[in-house]
Image (cartoon, grey):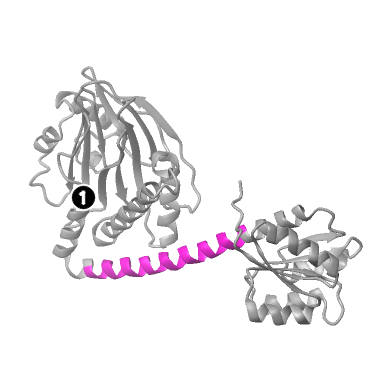
């Protein structure tokens, strides 16, 4: 339901004094402020003096008609919402008004003032959304400028860049209720295009993700900073009770995809984002083009979880699917970046997948097993970043 902007100031221009009186009484009873003018010339004077939030003008008036008012406002204040009122037979004038820039039109006689109120509220809501979008774009531009500046610093000082990136990673050994986290990031260069994070959402739910940015080095590491920022904003909106997007993995990936695409950095990423419900012991997740899929180890058997999706950030609008699986006692969940496939000895992907499952089973889902088995702790010159994220349920 549309939230009525009851504090809005409306300029109503019409040569019908009785109609002006009726409209004024109705809107002011609803909490609006109504400014009046009996012709276009007077209306423009009131507009320049008061700068109302919206203008409603009749098209046929003496001295100066509504089309002239609309032309002036469209030139001087192109984003100001203007509604026009026309006699039922004045279709040509209405078409011309819409071409000039009128947001909407109503026909006379106005029998029901609530119809006019609805049109006004709809235009004000659209105007508010446009203004919010402008503010968001300005903030995003400032953020991009700051992040691009950070990228220059990262490229100039790799050691400082790695320090920044490592500080963005979550704390090792984090515990949420009966769930324990661990991770390992082994970059192919000094900086990594892989990233992981896990965080508390509320007393009953926590979220986590693994991401793999296209390419390597400083530019890819910079995108991980942008990703961290985007996810923090989504979480912040939930904590401010603005929306519950953070609880919907498919919509989170769509939002991040739009953010990365808008940054125009020539990068995209693959990503898995999931939410665990502590009360229900359920894992809800969505996959954005990421390989390999999450692996769930239960009762000594490892299996890939279902799901697929488009890489994140290639398109401004992308849709994803959420999936849900229960997490039993002593179950372990592992996620890998695709760099793991580069260092497994098998040649084809099917064989690599089978080996990965067997290693998860043999190592009982332990990250330390993979670090030791694959020599990730001291390995340099990896063909790709290799990241592992592990979660296990202890109760």
Residue 232 at x, y percent in the picture = 33, 52
Residue at coordinates 21% horizontally, 35% vertically from top-left?
390
Q: Residue furthest top?
A: 299
167 on left or right of 313: left
116 or 339: which is nearer to us?
Answer: 116
Residue 281 at x, y percent in the picture = 31, 25
- Mark 1 = which residue? 169
Location of the C terminus (image quadrant): top left
Q: Write the start and end of the magenta stretch as one range.
A: 125-153
346 or 356: which is nearer to us?
Answer: 356
Residue 163 vertical position relative to residue 36 in the rendered view, above or below: above
76 on left or right of 218: right
Q: Is residue 64 magenta?
A: no
Q: Does the magenta stretch include residue 139?
A: yes
Residue at coordinates 26% horizontally, 53% vertically from top-left?
193
Residue at coordinates 76% horizontally, 81% vertically from top-left?
42
130 or 153: which is nearer to us?
Answer: 130
Q: Quick one: label 1, few (<14), some, or many (20+) residues within 10 Å?
A: some
Please identify the dominant SS of the magenta region. helix
Residue 2 vertical position relative to residue 219 in the rendered view, above or below: above
198 on left or right of 266: left
Residue at coordinates 87% horizontally, 59% vertically from top-left?
109
Q: In which quarter of the image is residue 5?
A: bottom right
Residue 253 at x, y percent in the picture = 41, 45
Residue 319 at x, y percent in the picture = 49, 43
58 on left or right of 32: right
Q: Residue furthest right?
A: 89
Residue 65 vertical position relative to residue 148 in the rendered view, above or below: below
- Looking at the rendered structure, the secondary structure element under dot 1 is loop
């Amino acid at each position: 339901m549309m939230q009525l902007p009851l504090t809005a100031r409306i300029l109503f221009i019409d040569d019908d004094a009785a109609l002006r009186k009726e409209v004024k009484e109705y809107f002011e009873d609803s909490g609006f402020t109504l400014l009046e003018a009996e012709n276009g010339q007077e209306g423009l004077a009131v507009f320049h003096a008061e700068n109302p939030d919206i203008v409603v003008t009749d098209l046929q008036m003496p001295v100066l008609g509504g089309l002239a008012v609309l032309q002036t406002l469209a030139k001087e204040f192109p984003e100001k919402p203007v509604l026009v009122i026309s006699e039922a037979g004045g279709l040509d004038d209405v078409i011309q008004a819409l071409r000039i820039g009128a947001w909407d039109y109503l026909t006379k006689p106005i029998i029901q003032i609530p119809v006019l109120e609805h049109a006004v509220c709809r235009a004000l809501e659209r105007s508010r959304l446009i203004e919010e979008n402008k503010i968001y774009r300005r903030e995003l531009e400032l953020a991009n400028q700051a992040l691009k500046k950070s990228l220059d610093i990262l490229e100039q000082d790799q050691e400082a860049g790695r320090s920044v990136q490592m500080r963005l990673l979550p704390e090792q050994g984090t515990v949420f209720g009966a769930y324990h986290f661990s991770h390992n990031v082994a970059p192919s260069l000094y900086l990594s295009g892989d990233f992981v994070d896990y965080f508390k959402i509320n007393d009953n739910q926590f979220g986590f993700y693994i991401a793999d940015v296209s390419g390597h080095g400083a530019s890819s590491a910079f995108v991980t900073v942008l990703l961290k920022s985007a996810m923090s904003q989504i979480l912040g909106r939930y904590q401010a009770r603005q929306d519950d997007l953070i609880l919907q993995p498919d919509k989170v990936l769509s939002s991040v995809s739009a953010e990365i695409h808008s940054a125009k950095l020539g990068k995209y990423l693959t990503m898995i984002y999931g939410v665990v419900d502590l009360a229900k012991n359920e894992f809800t997740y969505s996959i954005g083009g990421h390989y390999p899929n999450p692996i769930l180890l239960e009762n000594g058997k490892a299996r890939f979880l279902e799901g697929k999706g488009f890489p994140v950030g290639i398109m401004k609008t992308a849709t994803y699917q959420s999936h849900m699986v229960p997490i039993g006692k002593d179950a372990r969940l592992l996620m890998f970046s695709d760099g793991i496939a580069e260092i497994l000895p098998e040649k084809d992907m099917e064989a690599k997948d089978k080996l990965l499952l067997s290693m998860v089973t043999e190592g009982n889902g332990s990250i330390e097993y993979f670090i030791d088995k694959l020599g990730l702790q001291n390995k340099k010159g990896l063909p790709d970043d290799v990241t592992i994220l592990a979660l296990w349920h202890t109760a």
